[in-house]
Image (cartoon, rainbow, N blue to C red):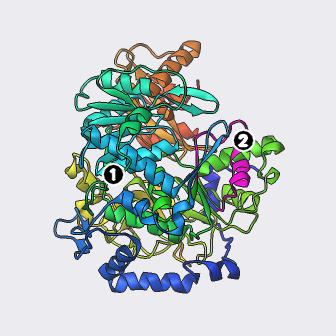
Amino acid sequence: MSTATPQSNIESMLIENRVFPPTAATVKAARISGMGTYNAMCAAAEKDFEGFWAQLAHDNLSWKKPFTEVLDESNAPFYKWFADGELNASYNCLDRHLGTPTENKKAIIFEADDGQVTNVTYKQLHAKVSQFASALKAMGIKKGDRVIIYMPMTVEGVVAMQACARIGATHSVVFGGFSAKSLQERIQDAGAVAVITANYQLRGGKELPLKAVVDEGIALGGCESIRNVIVYQRTATACNMVAGRDSLMHEVTAKAAATCEPEFVGAEHPLFILYTSGSTGKPKGVQHSTGGYLLWAKLTMDWTFDLQKSDVFWCTADIGWVTGHTYVAYGPLAAGATQVIFEGVPTYPNAGRFWQMIEKHKVTIFYTAPTAIRSLIKAAEGDEKVHPARSDLSSLRILGSVGEPINPEAWMWYYKNVGGERCPIVDTFWQTETGGHMITPLPGATPLVPGSCTLPLPGIMAAIVDETGKDLPNGAGGMLVVKRPWPAMIRTIWNDPERFKKSYFPEEMGGNIYLAGDGAVRNADNGYFRITGRIDDVLNVSGHRMGTMEIESALVAHSALVAEAAVVGRPDDLTGEAIVAFVVLKRSRPTGDEAKAIAKELRDWVGKQIGPIAKPKDIRFGDNLPKTRSGKIMRRLLRGIAKGEAITQDTSTLENPAILDQLSENL
Ligand code: PRX
């Protein structure tokens, strides 16, 4: 079976009418059992919105000081939830399980790149986190300080996040694939006092430097706030250590007190900042709270994944992304689950690795991205040795998808070949800003439709509106919004409250409803949501968010070579979208091998500026870019050219229509 092009995906989604209701047995055993229960929960939230959330927050979290206020809207859109309550996130993920049967349960089954497995119980994880937290404290890191985490997928990565939470420090995890410059920008913007990193990371049998990138980032300047760099020694290879600033994680931990009282913080205390791309060149530091965020991380584990005591949960996302925050570092632990953490890549030593690991660890809930599924479909088609049929996947009971639209063809393959036509697929729509799932099926309730994220979770007031915020009827495409605040929502953009208001709560819509930045349409019959893609200049490449302006800024920063650049997305079979850059050079337009060489130079340059995930797949050179009379780049035209479409628009207003032919030329 082959994957269709995204163009035909959209078409096939429009005509999609296959429905997969949950089996009676699934409904019976589920936490949220049947649509009746789901509808009753939604009705309860409608009827008494604050009471609904207050009950959940009371029942699902351990509070040091109980809250008396639920939602404070006095300074909207800077909403506050449970603001006078006090708690600690690490306490809720670890201490809470001590003295219960969960303490000796495996919290983490860690599988290293080379296949070695290490199990860590809740009790052991508590000890590790406490001791490392003591070490951070001994260095003078305290509540409210910001700490950058630049770590591989390891137990230590989670320990670093939990240790920060334990002492009330706000962490900001930077994905290990981001460049020195990206790291420097984040250190500066967050005003971080420390970086926790590893000497190297191991991926696909290769040792890749991390500490050297941290050194390079700090050397770029403006990082004087950094007092400590703490290095987890992942491999035996030595790395440069700066006297007085750098220390080894195992050495500082060995010297530290074994226990560390959690620092109880107000519910609104920032647990973390996570940088993500927006429609301007500068990434935004999405700030999340402690109480509301953690509540949703725990609840969505229970609701969306129907978590049961015996489950083995595996979310394949890296801790550098929000999915790795909510569904690796916090949600599974807060819910007392056993989870698999995987250091490596899905294609090493072969593309059957995921299936082999599901069999080996008897995974029951598997959560991954459509891009991974699509690439594994391709691999399985080419080599039946890596086909999921080669592994015993009978332990699976629920599958999940996240990060980008899943095309119905990939959905069906996942459903049949991985889920054995018995496992519901939860297609979870959410964002860095939402903290956790927003629109998703519930395994024991929602009839599934391939390619649709179905219905909002109870308490999430999602709707589709026009530019003025007016509700649109089912069947009409518009902008996805959330009309009421929810506990896990973004609190602000770090250092930029104005941008927060402007980006998410536009005045034209009244200034208090959350604009997701995605287009969506609801099915005329059943009201199911289907996400149609971003409505801003944000691309989704392999489930990774990239701003077109961010890549444009990186290109023009090559000031010796580049005069002007415009970046657009093009549908891609494998990665969802691919980056296409149109570039005007300061010299004459190159052709042939010369053009290829310059394109490679620019691709590597962008890799250095942002990270390899931002490298344009395709670079086209022109003497000029198509602009309107007022000088605005005609992006729609460029998007058409990138797709290889014939130009049907009126181009008579263009200064130099001949450039369209130039820009259409593939290298
Ligand atoms: O466009 C939507 C897409 O990913 C964007 C959010 O990206 P990010 O903040 O990096 O978070 C990714 C992990 C939650 C959204 O604005 N997106 C995410 N999930 C889905 C999706 N598009 C369609 N279907 C989904 N299930």
Q: Is residue 440 visible?
A: no
Q: Which residues are magenta?
A: 340-364
- Secondary structure beneath dot 1 equals loop
Classify residue 67 as left or right of residue 516: left
Q: Toward the viewer: 489 or 133?
A: 133
Q: Nearer the viewer, mark 1 or mark 2?
A: 1
Which residue is pictured at 47% across the width and 42% down the height? 156
Q: Toward the viewer: 165 or 216?
A: 165
Classify residue 176 as left or right of residue 423: left
Which residue is pictured at 65% across the width and 67% down the height? 16
In the figure, residue 267 lies in which quadrant?
Answer: bottom left
Classify mark 1: residues with Cα within 10 Å, few (<14), some (14-19) or many (20+): many
Q: Toward the viewer: 641 or 449?
A: 449
Which residue is pictured at 40% across the width and 53% down the height? 432
Quarter placement of the C terminus: top right
Q: Amino acid at mark 1?
A: Cys
Residue 343 within the segment the image draws in magenta? yes
Classify mark 2: residues with Cα within 10 Å, few (<14), some (14-19) or many (20+): many
Q: Toward the viewer: 146 or 440?
A: 146
In the figure, residue 592 lies in which quadrant?
Answer: top right
Measured in 3D between alpha carbons, the distance from the residue under mark 1 to the one under mark 2, in whole angstroms, is: 42 Å
Which residue position is annotated with label 2?
A: 351
Residue 125: x percent and y percent?
48, 52
In the picture, the disc for residue 124 is: none
Q: Is residue 121 visible?
A: yes
Residue 665: x percent and y percent?
56, 27
Q: Is residue 470 above or below residue 194?
A: below
